[in-house]
Amino acid sequence: MTNQKKFSYLAIVLVALLCIVFGIRSLMERRNPEHKKSEATKALEDTFKYTEVVTGELPPGMPAEWILEKDMVVTNQYTSKGAGYMQSTLQYESKLSVLLATGLYTRFFEKNGWKLQSRVNKENFQSIDGKKGLDKISLVVNENDITKVVTVDLTFMASYLDQLPPVQ
């Protein structure tokens, strides 16, 4: 057999082996969908699984069942009341990324019957507004470009317009 024929047979065998290897890998991926997830998706899911949240230390007027991150650093909180409404705001520094903090609250609000009405999705800034009956929520999560600190601003506004006496 000539060298050229040997080389041709060797090339055919190598191509066949590569096809077999890629075919086996493809079958394994179809049987195990975990392989299809990107590393970012896996990291996001892992973070949600292990994120510890606690209830408590909310400003007066906020629903007691709302979740908070463990070991958060509160930078501002207040409650204000007016004719027919009450607003309660909590601002804190988060240990989570903008994406993870927004995802955490989005899932919580959706599970608890809030209708999310508007969203702004940017790399270092996300915002969500929602409504449940007459009550409203606003969530703003942003990362400071210089310090890289992620801040969460959570506002709850309860409307008591239905409890005001009619105007004469």
Image: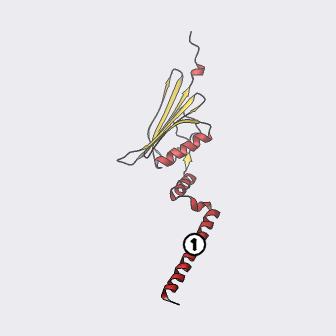
- x and y percent of residue 34 in the render? 59, 60
Q: Residue at x 63, y 67 (%)?
A: 27
- 138 or 163, which lies in front? 138
Residue 58: where, in percent of width, then height?
Answer: 52, 38
**Would you identify the image quadrant in which residue 108 lies?**
top right
Quadrant the C terminus occupies: top right
The residue sitting at the bottom extreme is 1
Which scheme is used to colour this image of the protein?
Answer: secondary structure
| Residue at the limit of the structure toward the top, as seen here | 168
The front one of 15 and 49 is: 15
Q: Residue at x 60, y 66 (%)?
A: 26
Task: Answer left or right for 146 relative to 55.
Answer: left
Q: What's the residue at 56%, 54% (across, down)?
A: 45
Give the camera-side residue of 76 and 36: 36
At label 1, counting other C-alpha atoms closer than 10 Å, the crowd grade (few under 14, some 14-19, many 20 or more) is few
The answer, for residue 23, to whether it is visible in the render is: yes
Numbered marks: total: 1
Q: Check disc 1 and report the residue beneath it.
A: 19
Three-letter amino acid code of the residue under disc 1: Cys
Q: Residue furthest left?
A: 146
Which structural element holds mark 1? helix
Instruction: Locate residue 159: give its quadrant.
Output: top right
* Residue 158 in the image: above or below residue 119: above
Task: Please indicate, yes or no, whether residue 71 appears anywhere in the rendered image.
Answer: no
Looking at the image, which residue sits at the far right? Answer: 31
Residue 151 to residue 79: above or below? below
Q: Position of residue 98 (x, y in %)?
A: 46, 47
